[in-house]
Amino acid sequence: MKRIAVQTGDFDVAAELAALEALGGGGVASFTGIVRGDDGLTALELEHYPAMTQAQMDRIAQDATARWPLLGLTLIHRVGRLEPGARIVFVGTASRHRAAALESCAFLIDWLKSHAPFWKKEHFAQGSPRWVAARAEDEAKARGWTA
């Protein structure tokens, strides 16, 4: 089972986990990202180029299934304008063994954080909006998977 979605609407974490658990493996790992409200942030706006995003997410999902013996994986990333507290991303993996589930989940979220073709703009109560630049620590973490 492979589920990849880019959507404006929210997602149901419990339903996504239940679908992965139903695959009958020994381990399910997940990560849910939430929009933070640090420093007066009022919204995070995400843009993307749909064909590019879908192709890249398909490729990284295929990479994960080639590296680890996965029974299933789910990648969901939201786009549009999201307020603090909103769910922004979900990664879930299922495998017969916990190590494969945990490692593949970490690999996928590291890749999404650093290489997925999403452009993020932060909006603040005071001041102009600003585009979010890539962070060196996120890039380094993603590079660690290729070493």
Image (spheres, grey):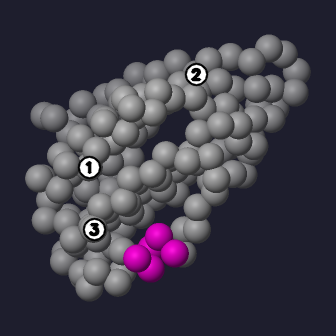
- Badge 3 density bin: few <14, some 14–19, many ≥20, Cα 10 Å: few
What's the CA distance linking mark 3 and mark 1? 11 Å
Disc marking residue 2: none
Residue drawn at x 52%, y 18% as measured from the top left: 133
Q: Is residue 29 left or right of residue 14?
A: left
Residues in magenta, as a range: 15-19
SS at mark 1 in the image: helix
Q: Where's residue 35, x and y in %?
A: 65, 44
| Contact check, label 3 and label 1, Cβ < 8 Å | no
Identified by mark 3, the residue type is: Met
The vertical placement of 107 against 18, above or below, is above
Q: Nearer the viewer, residue 141 or 133?
A: 133
Q: Secondary structure at mark 2?
A: loop
Give the residue type at disc 2. Answer: Val
Residue indicated by mark 1: 61
Above or below, 103 relative to 27: above
Q: Main secondary structure of the magenta part?
A: helix
Rendered location of residue 80, percent (x, y): 65, 37
Q: Which mark is residue 132?
A: 2
Residue ID at (22%, 35%) = 144
Q: Residue at x 63, y 57 (%)?
A: 10
- Residue 49: x and y in percent read 47, 27
| Residue 61 visible in the snapshot | yes
Left of 109 or right of it: where is 32?
A: right
Q: Is residue 4 magenta?
A: no
